[in-house]
Amino acid sequence: MTESGSTHHRPASPGALARLRWLVPLAFLVLTGWLLWREVGTQFDLPEIQRTLLDVPTVAALAIALLALFAVAFTGLVDGLIGHWLGLGLNWRDYLRLSFVANALANTLNLSGAMGAGIRLMGLTAHKVALPRAAALIGMQALSLPLGLSLLVVLTLATHSLPLTAGTTERTIAWLVLAAAALYLPLYFVLTTRRRLMRWLPHDLGLPPLRLKLELVAASLLDWVLAAAVLWACLYISGAHVKGGLLLGAFAGASVLGLASQVPGGLGVFDGLILIALKEAGYDPPVIVSGLLLFRLAYYLLPLLAGLYVGSEMFTQNSQALARLRTRLSSHPLFGLLGLPAVLLADLGTRLVAILTFLAGALLLGSAAMPSVIEHVNVVREHLPILFVEGASWFSILTGVLLLGLARGIDGRLRVAYRLTMWLLLISAGLAVTKGLHFGEALFLLAVALLLRTRKRAFTRRAMTLGAMTSAGWYAGLAACVLVFFAIGAAQVLGDDSFDLFYFGFGEHTSRIGRGLVAAGFGLVVYFIWQFFAVRRPELSLPNRGDLEQARALYRAHGGGEFAHLTFMRDKHLFWAADHKTVVAYGSVRNRLVALGSPCGPENLIDQAILEFRRHADAQDRVPIFYEVLEPDLSHFHDAGFDLFKLGELAIVKLDEFSLAGKRWEDLRQAVNRSVKEQ
């Protein structure tokens, strides 16, 4: 039997390392949250944060955006230096492009280094780089990138410009982590001189020379300094004019602890530590939070969107190549250490666009939950009638809930979900401007729509499996966002004694969010009704007499194999491929389409028939299986990327030498005689 998709290995039981991957980020987040509560408390002024963000000059914001894109792309210098030493033959443009895509995604989705490694591997494979050389570049890049941060920590410790909290326990933990980071630089120079530790380098290549290592240290240092410069600029235009030495110290410490936390992008840990350090230095928390939000947008979100757009063709699905790549990687020590998620990378582009669609819905709900600043309320009052504003706000919440739900369809590559999501994103962008002049929100929605458009060819499915654990995760996210919105709305409504659901006014946020709760509930009902009818698989029809006669003619012309006669039991479906010149008899078992034997038809059309049957199954989000495939046909399925599974043996009996005589065949002889008598 052969089955497409991933091989079916029994998952190993989670060990201590797997538990630590969950416990360490959770511990860091809890500790950072407790420190924030102790040091900052309730000093967050949400309207002041909004006002600070809205007052950011447009030209300055654009300049910071360009600086952030340059900072992320600059890491390509590290790749280029290593690639030149390895003699890969790529030009600098290729290194910069590949590095930009890998770093943009790895900054946001840090999977123990696996994300950046996987993207680089896909790009280098596309450039025909041999696996040992590609592994060498990826390994050297992973080892070299922290060098600049380690040197930065050494410099800040030496100059006593590293701000630390006053608590004894927290200070001790921070010192231990920072000391380990400072030791990384000298350890790198020592360990890279040991061939036994660098055994994953190609055998025909020597150890990295001292000049290369010094160049990598300098390039890595500039890379981290550029990231710190982006943060400084974001804080500066928000109103926090932080001194360079103080910021470098806070940035170095927060970056190390953020990396140690294993939280993707250091989200929460990095930001919380920067906030605590600068707050103790005398800066206002609302201003710092505004700068950190701008930094997240400029250095993480914007490069992520640009990286997805630049590298969109890298994420096209090629199951055959990925299946072979997984086999080759399984024995390589470097990728075994990283735990490279090849299955995730197979559909990376679509998965990330689905996440961005979900974030777009969450953004719409979050925007509706927060009151608009008074300056925007006054501008809207002068140019738009009240019904436009109220309608835009109500429909914005409705589309937000629908986008949260449709993210599951985008993840499942559902064609109808793609069409609806495109329209909703474009409509929501217009509503964002109408309801309160939220231009940044509108730009994000348009950017997601543009990225979704680049993946149009990936949306080929007409149906989707709803009972899988993947669906449960998306539904849990949908429920969580809507429940949080309901909680915020209910708290505002119950806390306003003068609440009137039917009072309309430009500044009446409480009444507006009360009506928004109705829109959110209505959106949930509409989404689940749509999903029940829109993603159901089509009914598979059994063949009629004409179909069976056509199949009989094909069997007579090309030989239907040992199991062709079972087609005429009329309990199997027929799939016609290659312009009706080949046929596949199959049955449906839950989310699998099981074909009986190989396709029947001309030999030169068998490969095409296999691929068409696979697309037929994929369009319904089903797994194609070919059962009872004989050994001469196995090469067709292997070339198409199917996994092979030996289920049994086929007995061959020479009829001219076979006889029922003798004691050995007594039972079979009696059964034959009994069947003759009963006729």
Image: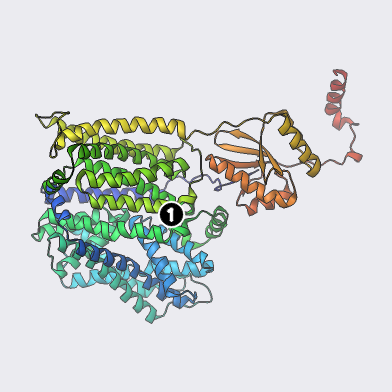
Measured from the top left, where is residue 528 in percent x and y?
Answer: 39, 31
Instruction: Give the left or right position of residue 49, taking residue 137 as reference.
Output: left
Dot 1 falls on a residue whose secondary structure is: helix
Q: Residue furthest bottom?
A: 211
Measured from the top left, where is residue 334 in percent x and y?
Answer: 47, 63
Residue under the image location 13 percent in, 53 percent down: 286
Q: How is the image coloured?
A: rainbow
Residue under the image location 42 percent in, 66 percent down: 98
Measured from the top left, where is residue 168 in percent x and y?
Answer: 15, 56
Q: In which quarter of the image is the C terminus?
A: top right
Residue type (three-letter) at the residue carrying disc 1:
Thr
Q: Is residue 34 above or below residue 672?
A: below
Q: Is residue 495 visible?
A: yes
Instruction: Give the left or right position of residue 313, taking residue 447 as reference.
Output: right
- Give the residue number, with chain letter if any, for mark 1: 454
Q: Nearer the viewer, residue 376 or 134?
A: 376
Q: Give the class, few, some or many, for how many residues have Cα within 10 Å of label 1's Cα (few <14, many ≥20).
A: some
Measured from the top left, where is residue 395 in percent x and y?
Answer: 28, 37
Q: Which of 109 and 653 is in front in this view?
A: 109
Q: Can residue 182 be seen in this view?
A: no
Q: Which residue lies furthest to the top in this view?
A: 678
Number of marks: 1
Instruction: Give the left or right position of residue 340, taking residue 374 as reference.
Output: right
Residue under the image location 26 percent in, 63 percent down: 65
Question: Based on the displayed image, in which of its 4 quarters is residue 591 positioned?
Answer: top right
Instruction: Give the left or right position of residue 60, taking residue 214 as reference.
Output: left
Q: Quadrant of the N terminus?
A: top right
